[in-house]
Amino acid sequence: MTSTSEETTVIIVGAGVSGLTLASFLRTSGVACVVLERIDRARVEVRQRAGVVDARAVRMFEQWGLADKLLAGPLAQTIDYRVNGVGRIFETIEDDGSPGRFCTQQMLVNNLLRELIDVMAGDIRFSVTDVSIQNDEDRRPRVSYSDAAGAHEFVCDYIIGCDAEHGVSRASIPDGVLTKYSHDFGYAWLAALVEAPVTGHPIMGVSDHGFVAQLPRGPHRSRYYLQCAFSDGPADWPDTRIWDEIRLRLCDNTIENAVVHDKDFVPMRSVVYAPMQYRNLFLVGDAAHLLPPTGAKGMNLALYDVDVLAQALVRAARDRDRAALDAYSSTVLPHIWKYQEFSAWMTDTMHDAGDPTQNGTFRQMAARARLDNLFDSPTAARLHSEYQRGLN
Ligand code: RFL
């Protein structure tokens, strides 16, 4: 077994969408960095999740010169908001540049891995264990980890926690430094990846029997989301029940059963930890905030954090100017709170408007009026478009 000690400028913990995007931006800017990832490359490549890269994030990839290499998929410009089977197509108002794209997180991550490893010769260390962070006041930060070859240590200038909710980065911050703000909505979504494409527009469906959505995941597949109980698991949802509920909630008996590839249960909750930095450790994406997927903003907020932090790190590393780095948390948090609000609005509206046993018939009718407003009021439609596009 070996024991090594190395040096770099930035250590990124986690090779998810935020860690890989940050590493690409730093590499493009000539800032040395190493990514440490718990699982192997094959498992990173197959993880399915988000499906929409919003317009702000598309613009960000364009500005970093990477959009052509990383993004693909159809434009995301319409949503079919259905109430008990009756659809209305909401068209996102776009009068200032590129629209968002239906580019799956998996496709983006695969393109990032290819670009970073094969083209930029980036340093990503997969299948590492026992990552441990030392972020003391009076010396350079240190990150140690183990792999099959032995124990290793990096001395660095900055540590970036891109290791999501259960990672080591946020857990390394002493008690009392961070404030946790959180809200549980009291229900969950069953997310089912199925072998059936979206044939019309992506659907967000309100029904008296609960919420249902169908969103594209490539040319042959889609993901259905079905509101379910917080405590539900795979045993509660055999494939036959999934298809029966989809037909019931979309009021469409012509939908045929198809292969269900996987089922995930996602609790609807919102979390923010603040501040998002401690000494030379900076938190990004799900390590600092979680959103209910109703607004499709989790990955997009992670990409927003990356954009701000990458620019700040480049200034600190290249120009020895820490001002933007020190202001990272106060720069990103106002934006994060706006999108927490949007995601909570979407979650309350789409679920309250549905099953009245949820919150009563008064809230049901009021939430349906809110949906009507998106089609009746140009002002409401414009605000909704701004949020959908991430440009608010
Ligand atoms: P990730 O992508 O989870 O990556 C974290 C990485 O850190 C690694 N890791 C560690 N590595 C080393 N040492 C440790 N101790 C480690 N602990 C963890 C992990 O293995 C992993 O590789 O977090 P990141 O980069 O912050 O990205 C966040 C996004 O993945 C997340 O917000 C989105 O997927 C949320 N989300 C959606 N976001 C959208 O913008 N639009 C959507 O349509 C959307 N749909 C969704 C979603 C999330 C979902 N689930 C599964 C919660 C749909 C679903 C069902």
Image: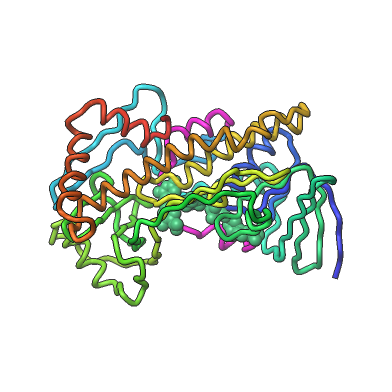
Q: How is the image coloured?
A: rainbow
Image position, residue 149 (x, y; %): 80, 67
User: 171 or 174: which is nearer to us?
Assistant: 174
Image position, residue 317 (x, y; %): 76, 33
User: Is residue 37 visible in the rendered structure shown here?
Assistant: no
Q: Is residue 377 above or below residue 279?
A: above
Q: Is residue 237 left or right of residue 354?
A: right
Where is the N terminus found, in terms of image quarters? bottom right
Image position, residue 17 (x, y; %): 55, 48
> Residue at (57%, 45%) from the top-left corner?
274
User: 117 or 238: which is nearer to us?
Assistant: 238
> Residue at (78%, 29%) from the top-left corner?
320
> Residue at (72%, 65%) from the top-left corner?
130
Instruction: Please tell me whether residue 54 belongs to the stretch shown in magenta.
Output: yes
Q: Is residue 189 left or right of residue 86?
A: right
When asked about the image quadrant of residue 327, the answer is: top right
User: Is residue 348 visible in the rendered structure shown here?
Assistant: yes
| Residue placed furthest toward the bottom | 235
Instruction: Please tell me whether residue 175 belongs to the stretch shown in magenta.
Output: no
Range shown magenta = 37-65
Where is the C terminus found, in terms of image quarters? top left
When asked about the image quadrant of residue 127, the answer is: bottom right
User: 218 or 138: which is nearer to us?
Assistant: 138
Q: Is residue 154 left or right of residue 103?
A: right
